[in-house]
Amino acid sequence: MPAVVEMLGITKRFNGFTANDNINLVVEKGEIHALLGENGAGKSTLMNTLFGLYQPEEGEIRIRGERVKITDPNMANRLGIGMVHQHFMLVEPFTVTENIILGMEPRKGAKIDIEKAERHVQELSDRYGLRVDPRAKIEDISVGMQQRVEILKTLYRGAEILIFDEPTAVLTPQEIGELMEIMKNLVSEGKTIIFITHKLKEIMAVCDRCTIIRKGKYIDAVSISKTNVDELASKMVGRHVTFEVDKTPAHPKEPVLQIKDLVVEGNRGASALRGLNLEVKAGEILGIAGIEGNGQTELIEAITGLRKVKSGSVLLNGKPLENRKPREIVESGVGHIPEDRHKHGLVLDYSIGENMVLQTYYKSPFAKRGVLRYNAIYEYARKLIQQFDVRTPSEFTPARALSGGNQQKGIIAREVDRNPDLLIAAQPTRGLDVGAIEFIHKKLIEQRDAGKAVLLLSLELDEVLNVSDRIAVIYEGEIVGIVDPAETDHDQLGLMMAGGGKGGK
């Protein structure tokens, strides 16, 4: 019996840059097959080729043994291929059902038969354990639930082969566990899944086999039962990767950031921060642990000038920051790696070089008498690209053309090179591979060791425990305790994060 998908000798180039170089991928029916690689390795390019968004320069694709030319996503759909993209393609004011049937609306005379569509969506949701409300509006449901809607869209169109592109990058730990169960349910019902990822624990937990690519080239295909995390990491990155954070004890000095009795309103008017108190010292990394939605985002936005402070104070080196303009806050010595790199970190249609000077473009040597000096901008960008290992065809490449990991490295290069007194790192490794995570942790620790204050906000408990020198636990807009990472564990942190325990100072 032939494999359900065979991609043989696939080569894809963009303006002379080879994204896929003679890659092979063979996927058997009824398996969860991981496609593993670093950020920018060419994983999404290969799957976009399978889905008909790109056409390969060389190679061939076989579906169930038959050679095919997939000219567009509609043809991919007809072949039973569906793709759940990393960035969702949903119309927010529409309901779940309206999004799912878009372009394939069932008719009752001249009208759309929405009741029939809702029944079909409900049947699919129940069958695969998706638990989606067909009548809910997209704007009112969680990110994890929106992803389930994307899965339902592919199932509604009859997909037998489902491509999941970095599906866990924006999910909470609980949602990740639920997605793993959904994937198992899909396979038990006869579907085949290609799982694009760089998260090794997830591969070990749910996949049958794994194809590894590196810098656009095929490296190996392995059975998960015959490998381990260390071997996968080494093949993905091309060297040994350490999962331990290498750092010496901190030597904190004077407070850099002092927050007193901070009250901030959320988007719906209720208080998101309720008299929060916090202090970050020079020469330490203070991690914030908390379940998403407990005020972390509002705290960062209040410090960086993106959200109005209702009452209380935010002091940087003893000087007030609250309700000042973002540029004033940046110039006073604050660096910000934002949790949403697309919304607050980059101008995606600008080149990566232009993005490197977003906070300093109006200063010498990047401008003279109000006129930008592009030679100086791109010379500076080339230096940072090399120093921070930003993998891009050139400094002129649009930021949106880079992988998520290399976009993040560009932001970190810009923020760290400004040498701020306080570096705020919000979800700095979200969606990144182990090599990039190792690099970013090293940069945060270098800032700490240079005597800077680092405020780390992460939903990854392992990251908070391994990188932080102290951990502040946030619950319902307040700091409920501060603990020493060496004297705590997941269980204690989890209890505090749920409001069930207090920690010391």
Image (cartoon, rainbow, N blue to C red):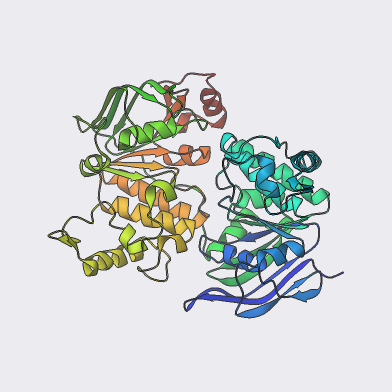
Q: What is the number of callouts on the image?
A: 0
Residue at x 35%, y 69% (from the top left corner): 396
Q: Can you name the residue that lies furthest to the right here?
A: 1
Q: Can you name the residue that lies furthest to the bottom here?
A: 58
| Figure quadrant of the N terminus | bottom right
In this image, 72 relative to 417: left or right? right
Residue at x 20%, y 61% (from the top left corner): 366
Residue at x 69%, y 47% (from the top left corner): 100
Q: Nearer the viewer, residue 33 or 13?
A: 13
Q: Nearer the viewer, residue 408 or 243?
A: 408
Residue 387 lies, with reference to residue 207, above or below; the image says: below
Q: Is residue 272 visible?
A: yes
The image shows residue 251 at horizontal and vertical percentages of 29, 37
Residue at x 26%, y 51% (from the top left corner): 359
Residue 468 lies, with reference to residue 221, above or below; the image says: above
In this image, 209 relative to 170: left or right? right
The image shows residue 130 at horizontal and vertical percentages of 73, 40
Residue 382 placement: quadrant: bottom left
Residue 384 placement: quadrant: bottom left
Q: Is residue 365 visible?
A: no
Q: Nearer the viewer, residue 389 or 108?
A: 108
| Figure quadrant of the C terminus | top left
The image shows residue 394 at horizontal and vertical percentages of 38, 70
Residue 315 lies, with reference to residue 344, above or below; the image says: above
Residue 306 placement: quadrant: top left
Q: Nearer the viewer, residue 102 or 371?
A: 102
